[in-house]
Image (cartoon, rainbow, N blue to C red):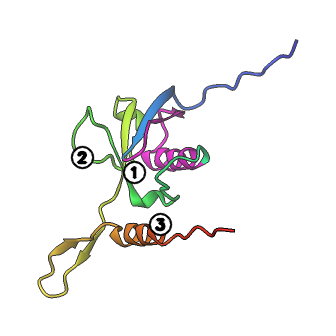
Amino acid sequence: MALYKQKKNKGGNRLLISITVLGSSGPVRFVVNEEQLVASVIDTALKSYAREGRLPVLGSDLNGFLLYCPGVGSHALSPWETIGSVGARNFMLCRKPKSEKNGRSGEEIPRKGNTGIWKTWIHKSLNLRISSR
């Protein structure tokens, strides 16, 4: 019979959290320490998401994402607060909105989506030719 050593719990309780990624089919679940920073949790979520091969592909830049807690409020969590301070276990991970500055008036103009990628894909799909022998 094998004996397993139990790790001593240093620094607080452990929580099973569920993070739903906007646009993905289901949540990512993993265990965190309640003293972990939100930035660290975002990093772990992105790594778990990529390891599982989920779509859409998000990348690994944790600075490009915001973590929300739907039950607490409508504002994003600060990357420097601890995940346990929220008092929740369900979260939503979203990309930060990208915007461009208009040089003349200084107001922000939201970028258009990746319509060029879709147009290219459709164009290539329609131009596929099946060779006959």
Residue type at tag 3: Ser
Q: Residue at horizontal 36%, vertical 41%?
A: 92
Q: Residue at horizontal 39%, vertical 66%?
A: 118
Q: Which residues are magenta?
A: 23-50
- Which percent across, then down, holds residue 96? 33, 59
Relative to the observer, which residue lies in front, 12 or 51? 51
Please indicate whether residue 27 sits to the left or right of residue 5 in the image: left
CA–CA distance in space, label 3 to label 1: 42 Å
Where is the C terminus found, in terms of image quarters? bottom right
On screen, residue 89 above or below 79: above
Where is the N terminus found, in terms of image quarters? top right
Residue type at tag 2: His
Front label number (3 vs 1): 3
Residue where numbered disc 1 is placed:
79
Of labels 3 and 1, earlier in sequence is: 1
Mark 2 neighbour density, 10 Å: few (under 14) some (14–19) many (20 or more): few
The circle drawn on residue 125 is 3
Please indicate whether residue 60 sits to the left or right of residue 102 in the image: right
Of labels 2 and 3, earlier in sequence is: 2
The circle drawn on residue 75 is 2
* Residue closest to the far bottom: 104
Please indicate whether residue 96 sits to the left or right of residue 32 in the image: left
The reply to whether the magenta stretch includes residue 109 is no
Please indicate whether residue 11 sits to the left or right of residue 23 in the image: right
CA–CA distance in space, label 1 to label 2: 12 Å
